[in-house]
Image: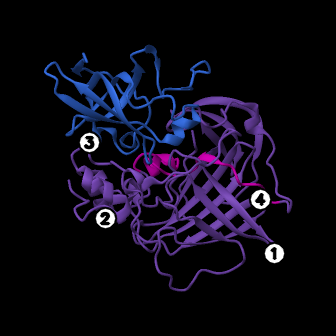
Amino acid sequence: MLTLLLFVQPHAQQRGQGGGQAAPQTGGRGQGVVVGQFGGQPVVQPLQRGADYRDTISPTDPAMNGPVPRMPDGHPDLTGPWMGGGSDQDMESDGGLKKGELDALLLPWAKAAKAERSKAIYGEPYIYCLPMSVPRVNPYPWKFSMSYTSKGLQHIYLLHETGDAGAHRVVYMDGRKHPVDPLPTWWGHSIGRWEGDTLVIDTTGYNDKFWFDAVGTPHTEKLHTIERWTRLSYGTLIDDFTLDDPGAFTKPVQMRFVARIVKPTIDLMEYICAENNQIGIAGGYLNKDTASQIGIAGGPPQNSEKK
Amino acid sequence: MRTNLGVLLAGFGLLCLTVPVAAHHGFDTEYDKDKVITGTGVVSKIEWTNPHMHVYIDVADASGKVTTYNLELTSPNAIQRQGWNKNDLLSGEKVTFTGHAGRVVESRGALDSLVKVSAPKQEIFKGERPADLSSK
C-alpha cells in the first residue's frame, strides 16, 4: 500500500534503492508488490489493474528492478513509455490518500462543485476528447520525449497515446521563468530542472476547465503543481506530486503516483479521439448527431452539468 | 436467415470483452449491467476508430424485422496490441454476440463476447489472438 502522505511543504527527497525481494501486500486499491523504498516510504506497484496493465512488465518480473538507463549526459532516461503514474478514477485514492482526506481540504464551493459533478459525469471534458491535463494519466501508454539540441536538453515533451487531445505538453528545460500573467491554458506553463536524478516540473497558468479525475475533483486558475519525477529502477517511475491551489483547497496537498514501464514491444500509436466518439448515446444523454460533433466542437454542451 | 435474439435479465456480471469508455467513466451511466443482450446476425460494419471500436450486427427477429446492434469495444490500439487485425472479422460474416444493453438505447450496447457461427469456440477480439488463427 502506498503510504499516505499529506504535507504542507514538499518533503525532502531521498534517492531510493530499487531491487530487493518483491513482497506482495494488500492495501490501497488492491494487491501490490513493494518494489523499493523512496523518500522513506515503500514504493508499491499494483499486482493487477485489469486490462490497464496488461501491456506492462509484471511487477514480479526481475527486469522491473534492473538499473536505471541513462542518457549520454548522465541524466536518467525517463522516456518509458509508461502506464499509470497519475490520477484518473479518483485522485484521492489514486494518489495514495485516505478516503476523505482530499475532500476534507476542499473549500466549500469546491466541495459543492464536486458533489454536483459526481451527479453529472457527462460534464467531464475528457470524455469529449479534450485534454485531461496534470496529473491525470489514463489507461494508455505515455512517455517523456527528451529533446536534445546542440545546447543540450532544452525541452521535454509529454506525449500521451490519448488524453492530450493532440496538444503536446512541453516542459521548458532551458532556464526560462514562468510568464508573469499568462493566458490560462489546458496544460499550463511548465518549467523543469534536475535536482540530482529527480526531474522537477513546476507548472502554473492552468485553466480551470479540466477535471483531475472521473469524480470531478475541481481546481481553479490559481493551481500550481510541482511534479518530482524519479525513476526508481528500470520498471518504476515515481511522481511525488504537490497540488497547491488556494482557490479550491485550504492548503497544499502531497500525493504520490507510481508508473510502470511497458513491455519493450509497446510504443505509442495513433489515437484520434474525436474520430468517432459516441459517449452519451447509450445512456440517452446525447443523440448520435450531437455526439459526433462534440469532440470536434470542443466541449460538452451548455447543459453539461445536467443531473 | 434464421436468427435468435434474446434479452436476458440476469446478473451476468461485467464480463466485458474489453473496456468501453463507459467502463472508464462509469459503466452504469451508459450501460445496464443487469440487462444482457445476445443475438445471432450478420456483421454489417466494423469501425476501427477512436476512441473505441464498434461492431454493427444486423439481427432479424422471427417476423423478419431487422435490428442493428451497435456494440462498443475498447480502442483499436488495444485490440491490435493483442495481435488482432482488420482481417480477423469482416462485414458479411455471421456471428453470435453477448453484451450489455444501453441504458436508454438498448441496441447501442457494450460487447462482451463475439464468435463466428463457423467457429463458435473462438472468441474474436478477446485476449491474445491465437497463433493458429488463419487470416483471410
The three-letter amino acid code for the residue at tag 3 is Ala
Instruction: Report in which chain the residue with disc 4 lies.
Output: A
Q: Earlier in the sequence, mark 2 or mark 3?
A: 2
- Can residue A110 be seen at all in this image of the molecule? yes
Where does label 1 land, which residue? Answer: A151
Where does label 4 land, which residue? Answer: A197
- What secondary structure is the stretch in magenta mostly built from? loop
The three-letter amino acid code for the residue at tag 4 is Asp
- Which element is circle 4 on? loop
Which mark is on residue A108? 2
Q: Is residue B15 above or below residue A98?
A: above
x then y, percent, for residue A270: 55, 51
Chain represented in blue: B
- Which element is circle 3 on? loop
Closer-to-camera residue (B97/B136): B136
Q: Earlier in the sequence, mark 1 or mark 4?
A: 1
Q: Earlier in the sequence, mark 4 or mark 3?
A: 4
Mark 3 packing: few (<14 Cα in 10 Å), some, or many (20+)? many
